[in-house]
Amino acid sequence: MVPHHFLISSLDPMPQHYLHGTCWQDEDFILADGGYAQYRAVRNATIQAGQDGAYIVANSTERETVIGTDFSGYHKLFLYQHAGHWILSNSLIETARFAAAKGLPVTIDESHLASFFIKGAFGNQLTSLRTSVKEIRLVPATMEVVVPRVSLKSNPTVRLTPAARMAQGETRYGAALREYLRLWVGRMATVLQSDLSMSSELTGGQDSRAVLALMLAAARLVGVDSIRRINFTSNEGQTNDFAVAREIAERFHLRFMTWSDDRRSPPLLGLVEAYEKWKSLCLGVYAPSYFPRRRPVPTSIVFGGSGGEGHRRFYPDIGLDRFLALHRNHIPSAAHFRTLKNAIAEDLAFLQQGPEVSVDPLVLHYRHFRDRCHGGRTPQYTNLLSPLSSASLRRASSLCTPDQLDRRQVVADILINASRELASMPFDTPKKSFVASHFDEVIDASDAIGSARTSGRVFAAASEHAASGDFTKQKALHLLRDDFLSHYDTMGRTGFFPRSYLEEAKAVVEEAARKGRFSHPVEGCSVSHVILAGELSGLAREDIRRPSTLEAFRSAILRRLPGRI
């Protein structure tokens, strides 16, 4: 059984080769460490950091061990450093637990713990490379960690991944887009010709439709009936979305909302296992309460539209300082806000030294934090393929003009080239429909699609039988409520959380446990915030510090002044 988190430290021997997750290498698709062993044997090649997928990879030579993630950083790497000790993991809380268990310091950073007070999409996840623990930082997705083999006590260093270094050479949007379409049509051909169990979400929006367009283009190359190997699903509760999805399914003869027992499908997780997996992968990283349901298996994959927002504007085009000022009133302490604001600016300046030097800071922030944590949530839980999070597409959109980003030309170019008919069908809202200028200014990539290679392979180990577990969302919410209540009184005494914040979180989690659901998982943000603080308090040598009386008074005054930073 694959562990749900990865952790390695200066106290451990380094693996020769290891893959946690799923990875694309050209048109080949590799699932987990068993698939990586097969891939090395057949292709006589290794996987490097910065490729498409959702993974952590480690490779060792006589000189060094290099550990990195997929291009989008959907599988995270947190680096703990203290004196000569270091820890690397995709779990913030497991890193802190391991450090404390080894007698190493865990120091709470109240300013970054306070970032989860921010309401809305910007504050639902990490806002900088710093975390709620001073000794732990998030490794940028563009970087890999290098551990010298001379002495495991040597401090690791970080450097740009080979993929990030290569990205700095591309200068033309059209060339980059054609390469993306050639590559991903070929990759879709790989899985359409495999014996994997496949499903894909279909909505009334643009992103899931762009993924479908790539599938349709691949099916034209390997057999139009191959598209029916994928079961397309849609949310019947979203009336407009579902109606559009059904119309698309009927027009293209898709297999739609077809449920059947399939031995290749992933089994349910056990309740406790699912809850602990959520804590390991999300606590202190992504605050909404989305629980994993199923165990990933090497016989099943899911397609999704994650990454699409990284190729257009998500946050308003008002500049970083003004945008951050809009969130000032969410954080009780002015000192915490100033520290956080400075850290965000410093980290964005650092990230802009790489291949995204010309990217707008708020687009850059979305990619490295919102998309990485929100879009990367499900790929941590299951074998989710996200064609719109591809490195080659990011290179293309990084070369777009502001006007192209604003009018969503990137997704238009994908759809119109891969399936003009699909691009012309209605969306769930008229504003998403493409207009004449999208078609007039489309990049012609027909030759690139026609030249896609269809000889890729899937590398995966045989699936081990696992009994279906007892997970239900309602039971998980009872565990969440009990976990919250175990920290409620202690966190109330710290003075870090306003009493109203704690009371509201308590009411929300108790109602969710009673009803068996949140009205939306984002309601759980304050609940996981309190649990995070409580967990870290139990590991840290010092208690969470409350703002001073003078600081609290000053913050209360400043929160009454709109726009004040």
Image: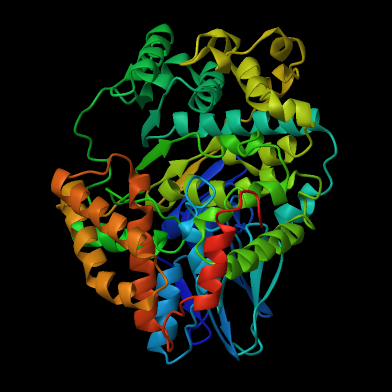
Image coordinates for residue 374, horizontal then vertical, percent: 48, 47
Q: Closer to the camera, 400 or 549?
A: 549
Q: Closer to the camera, 9 or 96?
A: 96
Image coordinates for residue 405, horizontal then vertical, percent: 71, 30
- The quarter of the displayed image where residue 6 is located: bottom left
Quadrant position of the N terminus in the picture: bottom left
Left or right of residue 265: residue 346 = right
Left or right of residue 477: residue 86 = right
- The quarter of the displayed image where residue 410 is located: top right
Please indicate, yes or no, whether residue 330 appears anywhere in the rendered image: yes
Left or right of residue 321: residue 41 = left
Q: Closer to the camera, 470 or 134?
A: 134
Quadrant position of the C terminus in the picture: bottom right
| Vertical side of 252 occupied by 92: above or below | below
The residue lying at 69 percent from left, 64 percent from top is 342
| Number of marks present in the image shown | 0
The residue lying at 38 percent from left, 79 percent from top is 537
Image coordinates for residue 162, horizontal then vertical, percent: 73, 57
The residue lying at 44 percent from left, 87 percent from top is 542
Q: Closer to the camera, 21 or 394?
A: 394
Q: How is the image coloured?
A: rainbow
| Vertical side of 366 occupied by 202: above or below | above
- The quarter of the displayed image where residue 28 is located: top right
Image coordinates for residue 498, horizontal then vertical, percent: 39, 65
The residue lying at 63 percent from left, 25 percent from top is 411
Please indicate, yes or no, whether residue 4 appears anywhere in the rendered image: no
| Vertical side of 252 occupied by 65: above or below | below
